[in-house]
Image (tube, rainbow, N blue to C red):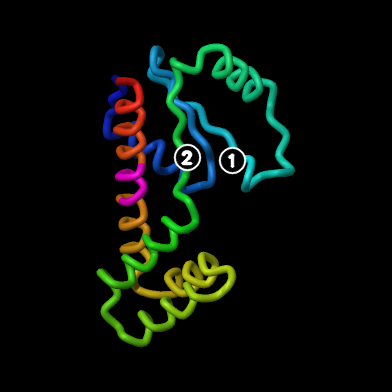
Amino acid sequence: MLSLTEKEVEQLAHQLMKGMICFYQIDKKKIYQMPDDEDYFNYDLTPDEEDILDEIDENPDNYAEFTKMEPSQEHQMMQDFVDRKVKERALAEDLVNALSKPKAVTGFKFLIDESKYKSDWTEFRSGKYQDWVKEQVDSFNYTED
């Protein structure tokens, strides 16, 4: 059964928010991260990263994989933040409008970074990603049973 410390959950969440994919080596309780292929398609793996992937292929039961949220989940998280935290109607409307356009994440981030809600968003997003990591742990444990 996989269990993580709060510090490990925070570390995994932080790496996922940066666009990384993470692997947790169960026997050594070690976290490996590397760029997600979808976000870094021109990125060449280092020899160490290639070795880690080879080890995962050879012994997949010893590793738990953690991935970032899907775009629809990210979008819903941003919408939830607006609904729950943003009190100014004009800013809330601007944020919802940004979410309805192409490059929604970029538009949302630009507006949030220029607002008094920047730290609230950072905290909200981090908390949601920590919950996401815990959901993946639960899923991993469920499939192991």
Q: x, y percentage for residue 39?
A: 62, 48
Closer to us: 58 or 143: 143
Quarter of the image where the N terminus is located: top left
Check contact, mark 1 vs mark 2: CB within 8 A: yes
**Element on which disc 2 rests:** loop
Q: x, y percentage for residue 100?
A: 49, 75
The first of marks 1 and 2 along the sequence is 1
Q: Is residue 54 left or right of residue 62?
A: right
Residue at the extreme bottom:
90
Density class for disc 1 (Cα within 10 Å; few <14, some 14-19, many ≥20) is some
Characterize the magenta stretch by its predominant secondary structure: helix
- Reading the image, the residue beneath label 2 is 67
Closer to us: 22 or 57: 57
Please tell me whether residue 8 is drawn above or below residue 36 in the rendered image. above
Task: Give the extent of the magenta segment.
Answer: 128-132
> What residue is rendered at 74% in x and 43% in y?
42
Magenta span contains residue 26: no
Q: Amino acid at mark 2?
A: Thr
- Reading the image, the residue beneath label 1 is 36
